[in-house]
Image (cartoon, rainbow, N blue to C red):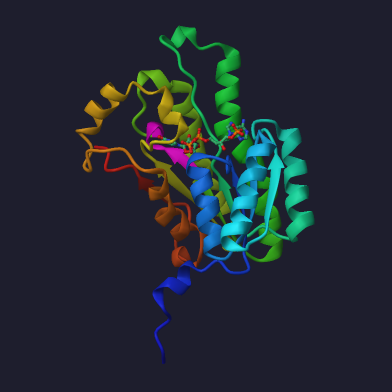
Amino acid sequence: MTIPAPFDRFDLTGKVALVTGGSRGLGREMVLAFAAAGADVVITSRKVESCEVLAREVTERTGRAALPYGCHVGHWDELDGLVAAAYDRFGKVDILVNNAGMSLLYDEPTDVTEKMWDSVVNLNLKGPFRLTALVGQRMVEHGGGSIINVSSTGSIRPTPNILPYAAAKAGLNAITEGFAQAFGPTVRVNCLMAGPFFTDISKAWDLERVNEGLQSHALRRGGRPEEIIGAALFLAGDASSFTTGAVLRADGGIP
Ligand SMILES: NC(=O)c1ccc[n+]([C@@H]2O[C@H](COP(=O)([O-])OP(=O)(O)OC[C@H]3O[C@@H](n4cnc5c(N)ncnc54)[C@H](OP(=O)(O)O)[C@@H]3O)[C@@H](O)[C@H]2O)c1
């Protein structure tokens, strides 16, 4: 009997992947990687123009179909339209990546307003909950799927300056395990826990302080955006067929 080529387990030919926050940063890297591995893609973020630019790039560079869709992930009423558009266009979603996320800057916890709290929790937790519920149910009916929640090491190593974000991402870790139980054995749900990556998010960082902090990490550096790809491809396809409810850290070895 021939041994299946190891890379076949990472092949996404015939699959459809929906990536929130797909226009920039880690989301963009995952979109391009999934398309290069054979998947058609749904790219969504608030600015539909950015999604359209990347959709054209996807098709030019990989030949795959790409649907750009403008949507605020923190607003539940916009998620129904996103799901409808994806299923109208492709008839299914095999891979959902809840990637859109952000934190807000503040000095003291008392500076965090209710509006700030809501916008951080809505985007990082409330939206992913609803989208996972909507798409996961359809994946079960369709007979399979893989859901990836992009969390943060901030959820397990919270620092005083990211408390609402850390709480929201910790919630995301929790619902990852819960949804894995809810949608198993048909659909797998995993968490990709990112550490510091040099994306647009890092433009708000005090780089000198961050670089100092990075010296205590095992790899002593931040991640390049494309370094998310290996973990994302693993969780998206058959390579992770026995992995669900898991947290995979891609963080350069935070102690
Ligand atoms: N970079 C890091 O160091 C790091 C560390 C740990 C965890 N993470 C997590 O990794 C994920 C990706 O981060 P990133 O660094 O790639 O971020 P990024 O470069 O800032 O990109 C964020 C993406 O999300 C979209 N987005 C932002 N707000 C949105 C909203 N309300 N609704 C829909 N889309 C929205 C943005 O597009 P629009 O502006 O067009 O909406 C963009 O496509 C996030 O969940 C983040 O929390 C990142």
Q: Please name the residue shown 39% across and 18% down the image.
A: 161
Q: Is residue 214 above or below residue 163?
A: below
Q: Is residue 186 above or below residue 255?
A: below
In terms of depth relative to the viewer, which is nearer, 120 or 214? Answer: 214
Q: Which residue ends up furthest to the front in the rendered image?
A: 60
Please identify the quarter of the rendering in which residue 157 is found. top left
Question: Residue 11 location, x and y as percent?
Answer: 51, 69
Question: Residue 225 location, x and y as percent?
Answer: 41, 44
Q: Which residue ends up furthest to the bottom in the rendered image?
A: 1
Q: Is residue 8 left or right of residue 221?
A: right
Q: Is residue 5 above or below residue 219?
A: below
Magenta highlight range: 150-155
Question: Per the image, is 132 magenta?
Answer: no
Q: Is residue 56 left or right of residue 153?
A: right
Please identify the quarter of the rendering in which residue 93 is found. bottom right
Question: Per the image, is 153 magenta?
Answer: yes
Question: Is there any visible trace of residue 184 in the rendered image?
Answer: no
Question: Residue 186 location, x and y as percent?
Answer: 60, 63
In terms of depth relative to the viewer, which is nearer, 173 or 12? Answer: 12
Question: Residue 171 location, x and y as percent?
Answer: 50, 35
Q: Please name the residue shown 76% across and 34% down the image.
A: 77
In terms of depth relative to the viewer, which is nearer, 98 or 212? Answer: 212
Q: Is residue 175 left or right of residue 157?
A: right
